[in-house]
Image (cartoon, rainbow, N blue to C red):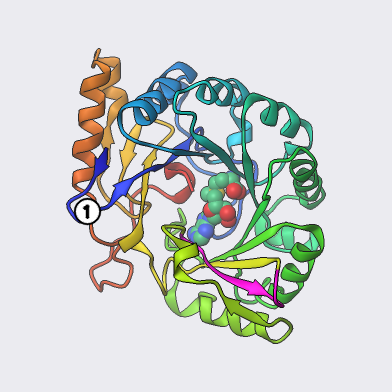
Amino acid sequence: MLLDTYGRVATDLRVSLTDRCNLRCTYCMPEEGLQWLAKPELLTDDEIVRLVRIAVTELGIEEIRFTGGEPLLRPGLAGIVERCAQLEPRPQMSLTTNGIGLERTAEALRDAGLDRVNVSLDTLRPEVFQRMTRRKRHGDVLRGLAAGRAAGLTPVKVNAVLMPGLNDDEAPDLLAWAVENDYELRFIEQMPLDAQHGWQRDGMVTAGDILESLRTRFTLTPEGSQERGSAPAERWIVDGGPHRVGVIASVTRPFCAACDRTRLTADGQVRTCLFAREESDLRGAMREGATDAELARLWKVAMWGKKAGAGIDDPSFVQPDRPMSAIGG
Ligand SMILES: C[S@@+](CC[C@H](N)C(=O)[O-])C[C@H]1O[C@@H](n2cnc3c(N)ncnc32)[C@H](O)[C@@H]1O
């Protein structure tokens, strides 16, 4: 079991499959992109499957989320999913993606054993999408979403980040669209994880702002805390149900006390938190011949060092060295 010194047990593993992305979201990375990891630094498909197997069969991980970068850019994705689906006990598997290419791959991923997708989409306006992502791919994302739903990768969740002066007026429109299309919408507060270090607390759209905006058009009833469990999103029932809307208030209402996550970067480093400043190198140990038992032990030791909270509210907070795309969002 992956236990930390605060009594939390990690059962949810985020696996980053690549640090590369085909979008350039302004809150994530600069226009020119980043210095990508070189291929030898990336875990191979076999190494990923081995570490996932150890996590599931030795360490109590129940849920795997594949992410990146953009995980659909990883050529071996379907094969990795298929091999992880054969593990006993079989983990729940989902994919966090920008949806570009999902139109072509959704059915194959479902057949390989993927259970669900989370697709990121911040705006319904193609011109705003282009300003926010610096790419003309709005239509691809909408088609990817529809393909995910048609393939049964449900509930399809949509992640949206609101940015002042760009799309902060769109919360009610996004919710109306999500309800109509049977997507579960979740707003994510912008976090200090951009490569350019451009995040400013004063400039961000808060959960409070988002809820105020939604309430101009919808009646929102809070879902009980029992339904939330360790989920990062607080959820509200929309207009009496059955649809829900979530807000992940990582900055203004952090949910660290119930955190059940551990992370593996595309280059094989364990991180205990998005905001952790330390990493534990499983790739190095693995390539030096560590046994499964030794790797499991290293993972346990890493989690024992997990901090009580992400510390964004602490005046001494320092942004992690690696940006979100390199950690795995
Ligand atoms: C880093 S991406 C990786 C997976 C995939 N490329 C995607 O777009 O979903 C995961 C999520 O992180 C969000 N994200 C990226 N940078 C962020 C930031 N600084 N604050 C909040 N969310 C961020 C994205 O909008 C996306 O929903």
Q: Which x, y percent locates residue 321?
A: 33, 50
Front residue of 319 and 242: 242
Q: Name the kind of residue labelled 1 in the image.
A: Gly
Within the image, what quadrant is residue 238 found in?
bottom right
Q: Quadrant of the N terminus?
A: top left
Q: Which x, y percent locates residue 303?
A: 24, 43
Q: Residue at x 82, y 64 (%)?
A: 180
Residue receiving disc 1:
7
Against 14, residue 57 (above or below) is above
Asked if one can make out residue 206 in the rendered structure from this viewpoint, the answer is: no
Q: Which x, y percent locates residue 260?
A: 36, 50
Q: Secondary structure at mark 1?
A: loop
Asked if one can make out residue 167 in the rendered structure from this viewpoint, the answer is: yes
Q: Residue at x 67, y 29 (%)?
A: 109
Q: Residue at x 59, y 26 (%)?
A: 77
Q: Which x, y percent locates residue 3?
A: 23, 45
Q: Is residue 328 left or right of residue 213?
A: left
Front residue of 293 and 280: 293
Residue furthest out toward the top = 289
Q: Is residue 136 left or right of residue 204?
A: right
Against 84, residue 114 (above or below) is below
Q: Is residue 71 left or right of residue 303?
A: right
| Residues packed near mark 1 inside 10 Å, few (<14), some (14 to 19) or many (20 plus) | few
Q: Which residues are magenta?
A: 232-241
Against 224, residue 133 (above or below) is above
